Amino acid sequence: AILLGEFGRIAALLRDHPEQAGWPESPGGGSPRYGALPIHWAVKHGREDLVRLLLEAKTSPDARDGYGRTPLHWAAREGHTALMVLLLDRGAAADARDDIEEAAPLHLAVAFGRVEAVRLLLARKASAGPRTVPGTAPLHVAARSLTPEIVRLLLDAGADVRAADADGKTPIA
C-alpha cells in the first residue's frame, strides 16, 4: 500500500489498526525487505503525506530498519530535504548511527552527492566529523568523490582534514 501510494487505504488501515504503523512491509508481499517499516518506504519514495500520516499514528521518527537505519538515513540518501525537515522537526536524531558501520545520515548524504541534504544536516547541527567503524569521516567520502561543494560545506562546519581512517589515510592523502 505504501509503495502504491494508496493514501486512503493506508489511512483506513491506521485508523482501524494503529499498531500496524510499525509493521514491516514488503513490496509484493513475503518477508520484509531490509527490515524496513512503512515509514522507511514512504520516505524512500518521497511521500510526505504518508510520512505525516505515519508520524501522526505514533511511528517514531527514529524507527530502525533491519540495518539500524532511521527514516532520516533514508531521506538523506535520497536527498528528500522536505522530509528531512519534517523528521528533524519531529525529533529525529541528526547524528543517528546505523548498525552496519555506524554511518550517520550525513555519511549517506555525502556518499550520494546530496548537497542540499548535507547543507541541511549541518545547519541542524549534525556533527561534521562522525566516524564509521573503519574510521571514515564524511570528509573522506567527499574528497574521494571529488564533490567540491560538499568538501567546502564540511570544512566550513569544522571537519578535520587531518582525521585518519583505520588505514591511516586522511581526506587529503
Image (cartoon, helix red, strand yellow):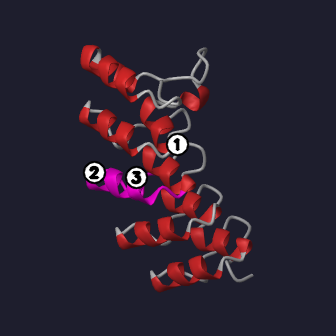
Q: Residue drawn at (55%, 61%), measured in percent from left and top? A: 109
Q: Which residue is drawn at 60% across and 74% down?
A: 139
Query: Dot 2: what SS?
Result: loop
Is 46 above or below relative to 167? above
Task: Give the residue type at disc 1.
Answer: His
**Residue 73 is a magenta residue:** no
Name the disc covering residue 83, or none. 3
Inter-mark Cα distance, 3 to 2: 12 Å
> Residue 52 is drawn in which quadrant?
top left
For numbered disc 1, what is the local secondary structure? loop
Q: Earlier in the sequence, mark 3 or mark 2?
A: 3
Q: Tag 3: Cα neighbours inside 10 Å, few (<14), some, or many (≥20)?
A: many
Tags 2 and 1 touching, CB below 8 Å: no
The question of residue 90 being in magenta is answered with yes
Pointer 3 and pointer 1: residues touching (CB < 8 Å)?
Answer: no
Dot 2 or dot 1: first in sequence order is 1
Under circle 3, the secondary element is helix
As displayed, is residue 94 above or below residue 56? below
Q: Nearer the viewer, residue 76 or 47?
A: 47
Q: For the residues marked 2 and 1, what is the alpha-carbon distance in whole angstroms?
A: 21 Å
Q: Give the range drawn in magenta.
A: 79-97
Residue 45: mark: 1
Residue 140 position (above or below residue 8): below
Nearer the observer, 165 or 86: 86
- Residue drawn at 50 percent across, 56 percent down: 76
Relative vertical location of residue 140 with respect to residue 106 in this rendering, above or below:
below
Q: Earlier in the sequence, mark 3 or mark 1?
A: 1
Q: Name the residue under label 2.
A: 91
How many angstroms separate mark 3 from mark 1 (CA)? 10 Å
Residue 56 spot, x, y in % from top left: 24, 35
